[in-house]
Amino acid sequence: MDEKKRILIVEDDAAISDIVVYNLMKEGFEALAAYDGETGLSMALNDAPDLILLDLMLPGINGFEICRRVREVSDVPILMLTAREGEDDKVEGLELGADDYITKPFLMRELISRVRANLRRSTGALVPAASAKTAREIAVDEKSKTVSVCGKSLDVSAREYELLRYLTSSPDTVFTREDILRSVYGYEYDGGTRIVDVAVRRLREKLEECAEGAGRFIATRHGVGYYYDPQGK
């Protein structure tokens, strides 16, 4: 699988970019590099990468704007590279549609692991084959990794699919934000549980756009977490 995957690195620090490219190629990936925002955006839109490693602080167009514009046309996995430790920057990137982040300085083996994990999510390799399971108006098909709401196809990212699959796996069961971080994201995140709130809000918005009132299926238990309400009360 890996040798067929094209990874785009948008990073203005040539030393970091070169070592990331070298290690990705050593692992069997095809690696492309851009050193400024304009070139990175152009390559993201025209070179069909399977995953984008995106620095936030870039000359020209910054990483936030690149993420926003890519998300207008593509669900390609985006992994943010950031030197900032502030939670707000990570949350802003995730709100714009990024799938994951890693904070500089990082270990190369951790970066490669994150790349592989996000590629597996985008291709459905983490989901066992099974028939669609329906909870009232929402159908989650674990074989094709698709979701429909009221008979309409719901366009979700790989991460949003995993979140929805997790919540609907046990209707009316309240999952804490820590449960969701551990089970859906698979890592120990240092960005706080606001990441979960952002993901749930985006998912509700998509559900509502697909079918009026569908956002209510993802309910909040205040002070505890989130749960799937098949009645949409």
Image (cartoon, rainbow, N blue to C red):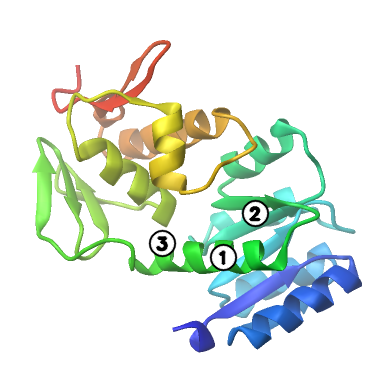
Residue 185 pos. (x, y %): 46, 46
Q: Which residue is mark 3?
A: 121
Please, what secondary structure does the residue beneath circle 2 have? helix
Q: Earlier in the sequence, mark 1 or mark 2?
A: 2
Q: Disc 1 and disc 3: Cα gap in Å? A: 12 Å
Task: Check disc 2: other Cα within 10 Å, few if <14, some if 14-19, many if 20+.
Answer: many
Q: Is residue 163 visible?
A: yes
Image quadrant holding the N terminus, namely bottom left
Q: Which residue is mark 2?
A: 67
Mark in the foreground, 1 or 3? 1
Q: Are marks 1 and 3 in contact (CB under 8 Å)?
A: no
Q: Which residue is mark 1?
A: 113
In the figure, residue 142 lies in which quadrant?
Answer: bottom left
Mark in the foreground, 3 or 2? 3
Residue at image position (58%, 39%) is 95
Residue 52 pos. (x, y %): 63, 66
Q: Nearer the viewer, residue 9 or 207?
A: 9
Please, what secondary structure does the residue beneath circle 1 have? helix
Task: Check disc 3: other Cα within 10 Å, few if <14, some if 14-19, many if 20+.
Answer: some
Asked if 208 appears above or below 144 in the picture, the reply is above
Residue at image position (9%, 59%) is 131
Q: Earlier in the sequence, mark 3 or mark 2?
A: 2
Residue 10 pos. (x, y %): 75, 67
Check disc 3 and give the amino acid type: Arg
Q: Nearer the viewer, residue 149 or 114?
A: 114
